[in-house]
Image (cartoon, rainbow, N blue to C red):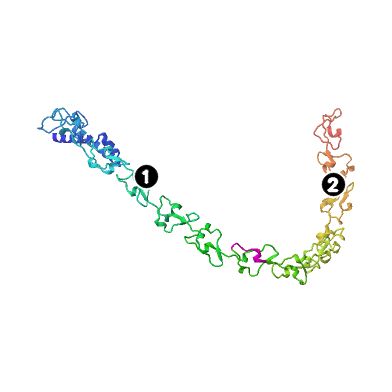
């Protein structure tokens, strides 16, 4: 039982050494920190279980070491009394719990061989660092190697002075970390682009793409026209032009589309008289102008133009035409004058504007005038008057001035010559008479209405009956009304009431709400019987 307890306690001590601060720092730097945390939790649980089983805590620094039965009892001095260990050795992490056999500890008892950095994998180093160049010769200072001992900052591409031929350094080389102590071309360099990566048409005017762009590598990305374009040849390199052509003006400024100039680019056809427009209407192109070659400087009027003939060369004109005025000043458009140029057709009456009260003759375009300017006698006739109209429509009468009213066409119309009969609504009746009822529906027999047609004698108020509470005006038979039917307000007024009426002695007081039959109330109307 004692041996099992001793073994369990030893295991607890070993697990305690794994929970030192350097080990925890190294664990936090591990890429898979979540897995490390789970493993540490398992170690703590195991230690708790073993502590319960043993009955004493392995973390206590006063726990005396257990030895097997029959061994010599150890002294109370532990390995912390050692000041130093030989090279490539160090005190163990549990030096406070390791006791020596005598009062003076020895190197064999307390010093343990130092670990080297090759006991750790390359992936153990934090980001931005890599393992030391010689891990087998790099010794650690404790029983557990730390990243500070075994890892160094990774080199950057800034340590690479240059790239191989046809390669370019990557941008910001100081920020590119290498995966080993010797940076590689793949890490720090990229293949240089060739000129065939330039888009078509990138070369400026006056330059051409290289003949073999895929074999020319650029010094940066993207390629520039200075690297990938060469000067284009000009037409000044062309030796001669074919027959009937000449070299373009300023050939040294005309760039060719390829490295060999062609005659199509650099030569122009010799100009002919077909390209010249004669300067004035007094000159004409020579016959067959396209066969007349001019000099390289261009065609001149003296080479290509002749004097144009005039209409004075035309001796007669066809029927219904007249010679042009000033025929000697009228130049023809060809070497032989045409009739259309020199003879003017006589106008027809279709172009004539007739004066007032006249009309164009029928079919005026068939009537040819005798001179270049038509006259009214030739083209116009007197317009008809309304006297030619035989009748007007119902309820219309012919105009009073029908004999002097000229029509707009050869046949007069009722719209031009007839007027509608008026109604009595336009009539003003004489004194003591009024318009008939509905005067706008009473049509007169002539263009002017008469009182006998539209007016009646004005009625008097004697014909008007007054309503309840109203009485006739004073002497209604002498009051004339303004319309065929007298208005109530014209002939009647409000009846007087008995209010304020004095009754004879012995009568009762008057009733003020009683209306009188006439304009003056009587005692009989207003005063009742004896009180």
Quarter of the image for residue 85 reads: top left
Query: What residue occupies the far left of the structure in this picture?
Result: 70
User: Could you say which is closer to the camera, residue 278 or residue 484?
Assistant: 278
In the rendered structure, does residue 142 fall within the stretch colored magenta? no
The quadrant holding residue 79 is top left
Q: Quadrant of the N terminus?
A: top left
Which secondary structure lies at badge 1?
helix
Label located before the other in sequence (2 or 1):
1
Left or right: 50 in relation to 257: left
Q: Residue at x 80, y 32 (%)?
A: 512
In the foreground, 8 or 436 = 8
Q: Which residues are magenta?
A: 296-305
Q: Which residue is mark 1?
A: 173
Q: Nearer the viewer, residue 489 or 138?
A: 138
Whether residue 309 sits left or right of residue 171 in the image: it is right
Observer able to see residue 198? no
Q: Is residue 302 magenta?
A: yes
Tag 2 residue: 483
Residue 431 spot, x, y in % from top left? 90, 46
Disc 2 and disc 1: Cα gap in Å? 118 Å
**Coordinates of residue 82 in the picture (x, y in percent):** 18, 30
Secondary structure under badge 2? loop
Which x, y percent locates residue 433? 88, 48
């Amino acid at each position: 039982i004692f041996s099992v307890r001793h073994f369990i306690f030893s295991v607890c001590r070993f697990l305690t050494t794994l929970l030192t601060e350097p080990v925890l720092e190294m664990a936090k730097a591990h890429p898979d920190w979540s897995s490390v945390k789970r493993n540490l939790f398992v170690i703590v649980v195991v230690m708790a279980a073993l502590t319960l089983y043993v009955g004493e805590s392995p973390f206590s620094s006063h726990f005396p070491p257990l030895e097997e039965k029959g061994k010599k009892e150890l002294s109370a001095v532990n390995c912390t009394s050692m000041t130093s260990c030989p090279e490539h050795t160090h005190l163990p992490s549990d030096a406070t719990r390791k006791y020596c056999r005598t009062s003076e500890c020895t190197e064999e008892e307390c010093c343990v061989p130092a670990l080297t950095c090759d006991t750790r994998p390359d992936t153990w180093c934090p980001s931005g660092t890599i393992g030391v160049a010689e891990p087998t010769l790099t010794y650690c200072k404790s029983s557990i190697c730390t990243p500070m001992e075994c890892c160094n900052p990774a080199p950057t591409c800034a340590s690479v002075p240059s790239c191989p031929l046809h390669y370019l350094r990557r941008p910001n080389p100081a920020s590119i970390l290498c995966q080993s102590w010797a940076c590689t071309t793949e890490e720090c360099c990229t293949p240089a682009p060739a000129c065939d990566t330039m888009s078509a048409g990138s070369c400026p005017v006056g330059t051409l793409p290289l003949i073999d762009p895929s074999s020319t590598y650029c010094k940066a990305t993207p390629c520039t026209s200075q690297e990938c374009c060469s000067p284009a040849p000009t037409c000044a390199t062309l030796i001669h032009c074919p027959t009937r052509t000449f070299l373009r003006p300023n050939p040294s400024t005309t760039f060719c589309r390829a490295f060999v100039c062609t005659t199509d680019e650099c030569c122009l056809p010799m100009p002919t008289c077909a390209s010249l427009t004669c300067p004035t209407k007094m000159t004409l192109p020579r016959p067959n102008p396209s066969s007349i070659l001019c000099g390289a400087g261009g065609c001149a009027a003296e080479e290509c133009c002749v004097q144009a003939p005039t209409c004075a060369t035309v001796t007669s004109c066809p029927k219904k035409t007249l010679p042009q005025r000033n025929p000697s000043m009228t130049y023809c458009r060809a070497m032989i004058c045409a009739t259309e140029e020199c003879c003017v057709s006589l106008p027809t009456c279709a172009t004539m504007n007739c004066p007032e009260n006249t009309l164009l003759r029928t079919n005026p375009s068939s009537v040819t005038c005798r001179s270049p300017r038509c006259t009214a006698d030739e083209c116009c006739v007197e317009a008809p008057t309304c006297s030619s109209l035989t009748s007007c429509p119902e309820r219309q009468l012919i105009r009073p001035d029908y004999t002097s009213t000229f029509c707009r066409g050869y046949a007069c119309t009722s719209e031009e010559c007839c007027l509608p009969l008026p109604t009595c609504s336009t009539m003003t009746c004489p004194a003591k008479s009024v318009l008939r009822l509905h005067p706008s529906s009473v049509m007169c027999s002539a263009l002017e209405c008469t009182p006998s047609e539209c007016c009646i004698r004005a009625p008097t108020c004697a014909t008007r009956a007054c309503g309840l509470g109203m009485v006739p005006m004073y002497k209604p038979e002498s009051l004339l009304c303004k319309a065929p039917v007298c208005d109530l307000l014209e002939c009647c007024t409000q009846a007087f009431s008995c209010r304020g009426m004095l009754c004879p002695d012995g009568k009762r007081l008057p009733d003020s709400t009683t209306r009188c039959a006439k304009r003056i109330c009587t005692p009989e109307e207003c005063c009742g019987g004896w009180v």
